[in-house]
Image (cartoon, rainbow, N blue to C red):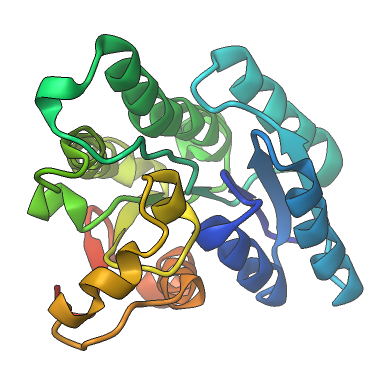
Amino acid sequence: MTKVVMVTGGSGGIGAATARLAADAGYAVCLSYVENAAAAERVVADIASAGGRALARRADVGVEADVVALFRACDETFGPLSALVNSAGIVARQGRLEDFDAARLERVLRANVVGSMLCAREAVRRMSTRRGGAGGAIVNVSSKASVLGSPGEFVDYAASKGAIDTFTIGLAKEVAADGIRVNAVRPGLIDTDIHAASGEPGRVARLKDSVPMRREGSAEEVARAILWLLSNESSYTTGSFLDVAGGR
């Protein structure tokens, strides 16, 4: 039976790299996007041209109805879900907490925390052996910001990833006996478009010398860590964190 993985935020960055590597590993890939349909379809086309199977669907993971529809589309196209990668997430413009309004905070926490929880809920409902599923794996994409705090830049984003760390630990314990492993990766300074979204496209160049390895990481390096956590090679690993941060 073909393995099926859901990759949220799969149109770019870490999500797109994960979708491509998962397809190379034999997964049928369902990926979600919010705005960039063309980029999502490019990922699907790349996978198809390499002989794989993929489906892209628009879904705002912070909207429950979108999440339910996304997972149903995956069910109907590929069948039983094997794995989930919670990669969808946002960052707002750099600033200090004293300048943030409630709308910004709610937007970041809904996308990064509520969205990951809703997607994990749908995955557990499908994969749990208690519900007739075959088990599976969930990987949450956290951030080294959850440990470092991101002062003066985006403490709200860092706090949202701290919530993901706690959620990873709790859910891992909750579903361990149901055949589901739950782990997280914590990327550090990775060369993706998220830095432009924060208002500083040159952030990687500014900070890379502060990384012990003296360089930024790539989306594919993070994706390879995710694929290991999804694989049977990590079969006794749950509730754990894999930092992909160059020692930062």
* Residue at left offset 64%, top offset 61%: 19
* Residue at left offset 10%, top offset 53%: 147
**Residue 168 placement, left or right of 181:** left
Asked whether residue 138 appears in the rendered view, the answer is no
Residue 204 image point, x, y percent: 33, 69
Quadrant of the image occupied by residue 29: bottom right
Q: Quadrant of the N terminus?
A: bottom right
Q: Quadrant of the C terminus?
A: bottom left
Looking at this view, is 75 or 54 the one in front? 54
Residue 159 image point, x, y percent: 17, 35
Asked whether residue 125 appears in the rendered view, the answer is yes
Q: Relative to residue 87, is residue 20 depicted above or below? A: below
**Residue 229 placement, left or right of 167:** right
Q: Relative to residue 39, is residue 189 depicted above or below? A: below
Residue 55 image point, x, y percent: 80, 47
* Residue at left offset 22%, top offset 70%: 207
Residue 65 image point, x, y percent: 62, 13
